[in-house]
Amino acid sequence: MQNLDALSSEILSAVDAADTLDALEAIRIDALGKKGRVSLMMRELGGMDPDARKAAGQALNAVKDSIAAAIDARHGVLASAALDAKLAAEAIDVSLPSRPEAEARLHPLSRTIEEVVAIFAEMGFTVAEGPDIESDYYNFTALNIPEEHPARQEHDTFYLPPDAEGRRKVLRTHTSPVQVRTMEAMEPPIRIIVPGRTYRSDHDATHSPMFHQCEGLVIGDGIHMGHLKGCLIDFCRAFFGVDDLPVRFRPSYFPFTEPSAEVDIGCTRDGGGLKIGAGDDWLEILGSGMVNPRVLANCGYDPEKYQGFAFGMGIERIAMLKYGIPDLRTFYDSDLRWMRHYGFLPFDPPSIHAGLAGGSL
Amino acid sequence: MKFTRDWLFDHLDTDRPLAEILDALPMLGLEVESFDDRASLAPFTVAEVISAEQHPNADKLRVCMVNIGGGDPVQVVCGAPNARAGMKGVFAPAGAYVPGIDLVLKAGEIRGEASNGMLCSEREMMISDEHDGIIELDADAPVGASFADVAGLNDPVIEIAITPNRADCLGVRGVARDLAAAGYGTLKPLDTSAHEGSFDSPVTWKLDLDGKDDLCPLITGVAFRGVTNGPSPAWMASRLNAIGQRPISALVDITNYVMFDLGRPLHAYDMAKIEGDALIVRQAAGGEDFAALNEKTYKMEAGMITIGDAHGVDDLAGVMGGERTGVSEATSDMFLEIAIFDPISVATTGRKLNLHSDARYRFERGLDSESPNWAAGHVARLVTSICGGEASVPVTAGAGLDWQRSIFLGFGKVLSLTGMVVPADEQQRILEALGFTVSAAEGGINVAPPAWRGDIDGAADLVEEIARIRGFDHLPMDHLPREDVVAKPSLSPAQARLFRLRRALAGRGLMEAVTFSFLSEDDAVRFGGGADSLKLVNPISADLSVMRPSILPNLLSAAARNQDRGEADAAMFEVGPIFLGDAPEEQRIAATGIRHGVTAPREWHASSRAIDVFDARADAEAALAALGIKLAGVQVRTGGADWFHPGRRGQLVQGRTVLASFGEIHPSVADAYGLRGRVVGFEIHTDDVPMPKSKGPAKSLLSLSVYQPVTRDFAFIVDADVAAGDLLKAVKSGSGPLLNDMKIFDLYEGANIGEGKKSVAITVTLTPTKATLTEEEIEKISAEIVKIAGKNCGATLRG
């Protein structure tokens, strides 16, 4: 008992000196284990008289507690150091690239069509469809383009062999036949748009033998050319995202509308680049007009009773203008580099509430 | 349609600046395609050659000192044979752009002699093809003056596009009439009075049209004698040059000039070359050879309208005249034709012979029906004033066209069709300014179109005339009335799901492609197409000649192109039409995708692996899910089209309906596209995929089990040819209603389990609904699974 202080200080300094968790554990066992030196001294207390045992017991417990506390403290220090060392050894070069993920994009054409649909949905239009292989009645005759009309010759039509009844088939040269199909199938009021494939036998830098158009047709009570103007101005401004976009209506000619108008939007070409918006120049983007009474009559409507307007625009053209895509032919080339650059992420559909720009993605 | 400013002002009396007129034209429907202010000739000035000495170092060059009208004379080295002292020519200084040689001149030396500019030929200035020498100007040309001013080449050239309905604007006068009606000046009068002929024409018309007199309803001729056919006057030549028409001779130039001036094509015969005393209008028998004025020979087809004499046919009516009877420099007696022919017949003839002419262009769009009557006098005066001689009394054949008609225009029509307010008197003013005749009628006006407006056929056309002259800028901008406060969907569910499908496939890493609807016949045949009814009659190329039966060939071609560009690992899809026949219902929508190469580029995680048939199947399943199909009800069947690998293809079916096919592309097919390595693909005909039954937006109630799920693994040994799908089916039926999920987690073939055998390890998750499963219950289900797997698939548990 007399060397309790010496024992205590010896053990405490050993604890302090312990530099691994294993060494610390060895010290703990040597001091506080079942056969440890402090534990053995505890056993010796049994042979003492009560007073001496009490005094010695208190002293011994105090020593035991201080050693246990010292070991705990040292353990904390050593465990933390060991963890630090382990983590240091586990270091990873996070500058290495992460695992690749396939990232694909939607074609600018489907994006653009969806934008057009979203805007016209807001104005109460539904989407109608028709076949790419058309009869020449729907593609021409019903639209007031008679057989020998110069306009019919200028369409550069692709023809297919005649059917069993000798009726000539064509690849539709515009989406306008769907106007006729729709009017034949239903009564007014009508508000439809028709995005779809169209074909003309042209192939050069600015013409593709296949391209996309979007037709529009509105038939209803009191619909006049002012509504055509309002509808298309509303569309152009929403589509291009330019609130003050100048839109100009110019007299033109289409066999299936009367009066007919070409629609131009304002732009500037300063500095070589083309910018859509208020400026000193105009870009033609679509054709339109009041449905020709002859077309209404061909569809079984009474032209004295019904009137309305129609329009048609090239999807590629408005996509190229909006998104700055320079070359028409690249749309159909499926070049992965082009698709990555000009395509759109699939989880960002255009909508009125979230916006139609899409350009930032 | 090209014309010059001064030409327009011959018909239009106006003080409006040209810039305003250029702005006004498109708003009248006459789109300005180009405008040339002739500034390219600005640097060229009149100069006088003071001296021209032989170049010391070059036989063919001369060293000229040139007086340019200010400062010291300039030295110019010139190669023209006609360069000589005292002549006046056209000088271009250093720094000038010379269009004919596409060069900006620089001061420099030519063979050691300084040269500070150029004396120019007409070709160098692109005003004609003349290049025999430099231009020689009249001796009184003022030195230093602008050459364009001196030569009358300062008249700006305007080119406008004419829509097919506006045949009346295929002459300058028609353009002037529109501008005048719109308030840009006054239309000057044109003298269309008859010219009193001084003799009877020795040639007359004979119509021999088998009763089809409507092919040539009206034809007039005027004979001229004693004319002198030299070069046409400078003003006429210069205008024709300006619009790209090469001046030929006065007689030819007059016919051209009148065509562009009044939209009235003419044809001039050398009367001396006409055999007999009649020109006969008849339909070709077919097979006749015809040597046209363009120095080409055409074989006529039966029915084409021709004009000929006793010798034979020498004119394709309305298209082109013949060489044999054409005028030449020597012509002194001329016969001039002013006709109306059936526009469709002219168009058909021109198209069949692929023969284009400015005359045909006007004939087929429709001429002024009265023009043979009024043009004769005007043209007679023009010819005699330029070429001298005298004109005959006109000779005419044909009953004329029944062109007069009256169209009723209600007072409210303009407002109801356009929304534009145009006062009634203004409507009448506009129509009359355009040449229409207006008379009062009950509730509106009766309007008779003029002879030159064959395009007007109803009240809507009159409204267009009034609206465009009034100006489309006056159209109100009325928003389309809203039918629903909250807009309804514009896409049907069947349309909407295709957009969802695109997103789903792109979300899986497939890039969206849009490819042509037509492809080569080889491609079509290889993929089950190529029927005659789907072959284009007039394809643009053999590669784009047949409607596609499948999108796969286009995607394979696209993958090959990308491979050639160094991008071998392509994953692409397209949703678009395919054509199983030429009827509308045989056009279907296909969703098709391919993957080629590896899943990712080689990289340090080693995550990349070769694509395989399961990638295609996974794409197909994802596509079906996006289309609204519950995959739990979909089964897999092996087999499929023969463009797939015979042992690596399958179909996803629901009942008897094939929803999708997928597989590895047959190596010999992949090879045909030059694709290296494995390609897989899938095809879905979306019209065959049933629409999900609509039960409203509410989802079925979710009931979650509170009891612990139990997982048990089974390793079955089966014959190698047993389909894993069948084994799963057996496990499913053995598991009973508590089955929550099952998965194959290992597949093993090896000698230790026996030749022709495989081990399929399946983990089954059971979810109790009423109470935790006891060991006994689990054993019972396990035994049932093993029993049915054994019975249906010959499976035994691996020991």
Image (spheres, rainbow, N blue to C red):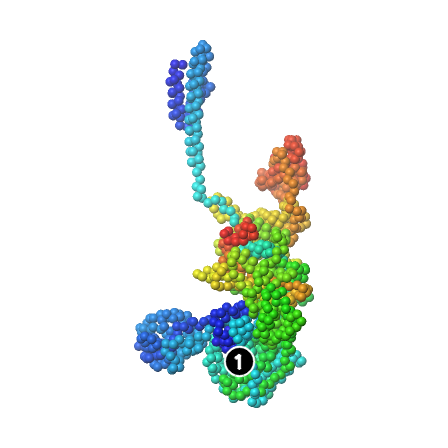
Q: Quadrant of residue A17?
A: top left
The residue under label 1 is which amino acid type?
Answer: Thr
Disc 1 target residue: B255
Query: Can residue A346 be seen?
Result: no
Question: With A9 as the anchor, is A172 left or right in this view?
Answer: right
**Image quadrant of residue B722?**
top right
Q: Is residue B327 above or below residue B613?
A: below
Residue at x 51%, y 59% (from the top left corner):
A245
Residue B457 vs A9, above or below: the answer is below
- Residue at the spot x=60%, y=85% of the render? B395
Q: Is residue B26 left or right of residue B736?
A: left
Residue A299 lies, in percent from the top left, at: 67, 64
The quarter in which the C terminus of chain B is drawn is top right
The residue depicted at 38 percent of the width and 79 percent of the height is B142
Asked which quadrant contains residue A129, the reply is: bottom right
In front of the other: B287 or B122: B122
The front one of A358 and A152 is A358
